[in-house]
Image (cartoon, coloured by chain):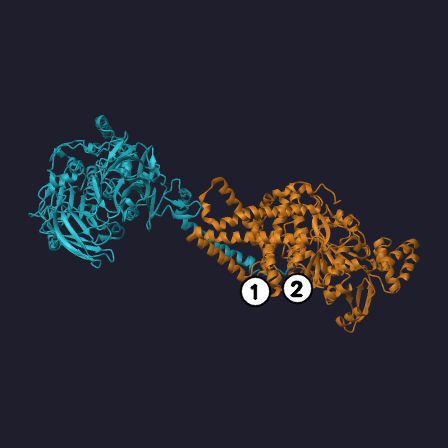
Chain colours: A cyan, B orange
Amino acid sequence: MLRQIARRPHTAILVALVLAVTGCNRQQTQPIGARAPLPAAADSIAMAGAATNGGGTRSDTTHGEQMPRIVPGGRASDSAALAPLNLTFSAIGYRSGIVLVGTAAEATIAIPVNDGLRPAEFKLRLMPTPRMPPATLVLRQGDHVLALRDLTDTMTSITLSLADAVVQDGKAVFQVGLSVPGRDRCQAEMFYRTVVKPESQVSYRDMPRPTAAVNGFFQPWLERVTFYMAEQPSADAAQAALDAAAYVARRYRGMATVFEVKPLPPVGTPLPEPGPWSRAVVWTPTGSTRVEHVDNGRGTILAIAARRDARQLFTLAGGADLVAATGFRTATVDLGHNVVANATLRTLADLGFDSRTVEGNSLVASSYPISLGDFGTSITLTSLRLIVRHSILPVNGGGSLRLHLNGDLIYSRTLDHDGFDAVIPIPAHLLRRDNVFDVRFQVTLGEGGCVVGGPVFTATIDNASAFVTNGTTAMAPGFGRFPQAFVPSFSVLLDPLDRFRVELAASVVGAMQQTTRTPLAPALARDLAAATGPLLAIGTSALAEALSAPLRSDGVRLRDLNGKVWDEFAPDAPYGAMQGWVRNGDDVLLLHHTGASGQPLADLLRETLAPYGWFGVRGDLAIRGMQGPVRSLTVANAGWRLEAEPDAPQNLFTRYKNPIFIAALVILLILSIWLYPRVVRRELDTTG
Amino acid sequence: MSSIRLGEYLVHRGLISEVQLNTALQHQQRTGERLGRLLLILGYVRRLDLARALADLWQLPFVTVEQGTVDPRVAQRMPLEATLQHRAVPLREDARSVTVAVADSPAPELRSILEIIYPGKAIDFRVTTEWDIDRAIASIHRRKVVDTSIYGLYFRDQSESAFTVFTLPQYLTFVLLCLVLLGGLWLAPARTLLFLNIPITAFFLITVIFRTWVGVAGAAAETAISISDEDVRALDNRSLPVYSILVPVFMEERVIGTLLRSLAELDYPADKLDIVLLFEENDPDTLAAAKAATPGANVRFLVVPGGDPQTKPKACNVGLLFARGEYLVVYDAEDQPEPDQLKKALLAFRRGPKALVCVQAALNYYNWNENFLTRMFTLEYSFWFDYLLPGLDRLGLPIPLGGTSNHFRTQVLRELGGWDPFNVTEDADLGIRAAMHGYRVGIVNSTTYEEANKQLGNWLRQRSRWIKGYMQTALVFSRDPYGLVRRAGWKHTLGFALLIGGTPLIFLIQPISVVLTIVWLFTRSSLLESLFPPAVLYLSLFNLLIGNALAIYVNMFAVFKRKLHVLVLFSLFNPFYWVLHSIASFKALGQLFTKPYYWEKTTHGLTRHGAAG
């Protein structure tokens, strides 16, 4: 890449100019990190020779980026594809199921509803508390009760009709409540736990409506989104794929939607139209951005012809709303929404939380999953201003509040009057990349308060509650810094630029996006010189060398403090590695592989992200050879040593190993024969 | 024939005076030796005159045995053993009689033997000197003497001779191990080196423990078997047997005079000393120097017939054939034994068990403070002879004899086959062989002072020969390991393996360990760490720190016994000295395959120092 720039200085100058101009513009309005790539930098890749087409900027093209012929190939399987849709709770974001605690518990379930579909019924798989008295399960939408069912402690499934459910903005929101009579209500919360298991299903009726326009392309529920590009894609195609990956992760956050990058079929080979629950995005600079319809098909293929169209679609603020409710706008989009201001105060509302009201008789709680990435780069939380309003406790009652961070108690107080507004220090050492703040209320209602009809403790956690932040970094260099370090934007360097590496980068971006509400804005860099700020780099050993990565030798040995070798990769044994460190003040996440095949790297990423996505990634190094498993560990300041196996001597030896040993064998045999009569079968010398 | 008559006859002939006769008779009172020999030793009479006088007294003709006076075909019909036993040489025969030269009055047994060998012939005795007899035997039986001295042990028991360096099974095992090692390095180098390192480290550890154990046992034995001066003084000279002293000399013209002076100072009746100087045929200079030194009448010159290998043990075997003493000791040309050593050895034999075949005196150096090398050599010898060998003795383990000052019962030594001329440490080999045959080797508290090598090249030549000899000995006695264990028992076998097999092995391995340590110290290379998993690393560290410290420590306290306190600090330089051993070991290993019997000659007489105080 560097050499390419060197050969085409005019391109480099142009890129630099554009970067400078756009950078200056942004700096006046956007308080972003000085070295972070500007969101518009992604546009600049295709600026040379720009011409509008379809409202967007015409992209650069590479060989093979031709729109393939679309055939209704998926129709043969339509009967299966169009069978009534059943989705498990796990697939729509309730991976741990729903727990109903106490005698009057209630939980909210929101389900995606694609155009043309209507919710049919819930098939709940339950795990009630043993010896629980017969209870009543209530399903409602607001005040509209949809179903009432008896529930005993032996029932493991129950079906609730959703015939009258109201669907709004592509989703239907339900409240599921459980009333357990006949027991002390204060004790009930200690004992009654009814679990709606993640295998529970929601089924739909009617047929999905064919997608007519771009703004309806990404339906509320999708099983799979496939981005098609050439094996040697253009930079714009790669940028669009990365944006799409982040978008899909945001749009279907928590859902089981799969995003993948596939090669365009060879010229002459048609592309089958996906089924109704899948979408294909085809990067083809020829023609215009459009939804392809074949034989009045279902419109599951989106052809993107211009980089700017892709940006508009995938990075526009409120992308989810855009798809479901608004039209496809062709105006240039300002990516400023992605930039998280280095504000010192971030309310729960800013982070996407509504005010929450909880009710109960003894123990009620509410959890707030908070990712540091939600706050922007180089920011840590110093305190929480917690605003709570609650019902007045009875005369003989009492209550307390406890605040837990990742399981550790960090604050408690007695409840009095009707609320409080407290500033709670947050111990920095308890912070992790992904955190859970648990607000727990423990109340005693006093004599007579625990009977049915007695007072119910109610508390509202105001979403004006806010985290106070400062500009330091809580996490040590390593994977824990990501995606926070990538907020608001980051450079992506793929060396060489090919579909394989785009797919890997898309996987990383998608996985990271799942962990934070803050939209990630990757900006593809043409080469290392053009990459500024935090960097996601994917390449080979050469790239690791160019970045002076901690692990960059072809052969490596992993050793613990005691000198024990835990893993070893000879220079001729390829491996894939992912490592995070700080280079010149910027965080770098590098994925690279040695040897010709990138398979170890692909396997490494797949195994590292399974099953918890980026949530499960820890440490600062993951390494995998041709044969697994992946070694994930913290190397920096943790006692591990990465030792480069000596290249030159070992390679030399490896190269000539066989001839050397064969020569040694021959010499040994010759010596053995030559020495035999001299040291074994000697003749007597009796000439005396 | 009484001695009075011999004396009177010599006085009558004017060959000696009355005074000389009386002096000789007084000596005879003290030692019980024959008058004629006493007169010779005292230098009162010439050997030739004595022989003529004896011929007159015995009424036998005198003859001078010269080239041409002996018919080899007639003489060779009398077996070498009988010839040597009776000192009789058949000269010629005719139809009626056979003429036989003798140096002593013919015994009836000799006459009987001759009548069997030469049936129907009258025996016509002639008198001559002992020297003529020995010279004639060596000349007539040259082929037999050569064969016996070279192949005597081989023909007696091939399995105990180093003529065959490797037996076929040993060789195949060696080649197979090389192939396995090569294959291992090819297929799994790290693992192979690790598996190689484990037994090496363990072997180091075992050797350290063994040597310390033996050294401590030697320290405890320090005063256990000493023979006091009172014991020596209490000896009655008349009860002393004839003691043969074999001194093989080769290119020693510079020290031969000193040697003869040292031997003359021995506290042992001169008339009961049978000193045999063994010259090589191709070394006329030393012979001439010896003649020029005018040795006493108890010194015999024996020229060893030529023939490969030309080694010290071959010369010793020739000397053994001609030795007349009941006991026998071997000294090197530069040796300066303590005067009472023969008596102490004799007392040790008398007090020791019947199985005691050999007594080893300690060796040390009179030029110990000449330079760094001689100091280190002295340190080493002090530990070896003052602690290690006494320790082995106390623990009942086989003792490898030192190069000189080993005293033998002559007859048992002959039964054992003498020295192996193909083994370049024939002494160590003989000690082990004696132990394997159920004999004991003891240590006596007397010292022979030698000249320590002061030149590095000379030292390396000598040391490489010693180590090669240890390798030969180890190979000889490991040919039949099961048989060895059966014959000698586990204790002897393990002692032999650790001392004889372990010594060269340690020195061969040591440089590898040293190089690895240095490489690690300077480079901290991680390459080595795979060879040293924690357990091996800890053992290696133990060997490096504790093992070396122990070796240095025992070396230190060896010096205290000799009261050479100034050498204590030099003990700390042992690790450097061991490097020289390793160099010599690799040279020895190369020679084991290319020149297994080659005798690396040590040059003596380089020192500027005189004899020990």
Name the amino acid, label 1. Answer: Tyr
Specify the quadrant that holds the C terminus of chain A: bottom right
Q: Nearer the viewer, residue A357 or A683?
A: A357
| Snapshot quadrant of residue A645 | top left
Q: Residue placed farthest to the left in the image? A: A296
Residue, disc 2: B438
In percent of width and height, residue B509 lies at: 54, 50
Image location (x, y in percent) of residue A236:
19, 37
Q: Check the image and report above or below for B357 versus B539.
A: below
Q: Would residue B127 be found to the left or right of residue B315 on screen?
A: right
Q: In the rendered view, would you say B225 is above or below B93?
A: above
| Viewer-proximal residue among A336 and B84 | A336
Between disc 2 and disc 1, whose residue precedes? 2
Residue type for callout 2: Gly
- Label 2 secondary element: loop
Which residue, given by chain and number where applicable, does mark 1 sit on?
A: B482
- In this orientation, does residue A338 appear? yes
The percent coordinates of residue A611 (x first, y second) are 27, 49
> Are the numbered discs 2 and 1 placed on the same chain, yes or no?
yes
Local SS, label 1 = helix
Distance in Å between CA atoms under marks 2 and 1: 17 Å
In this picture, residue A511 sits left or right of residue A638? left
- Residue for point 49% across, 55% down: B178
**Residue A628 vs residue A397, the one in the foreground:** A397
On the picture, is B89 further left or further right than A600?
right
Determine if residue B606 is in view: no
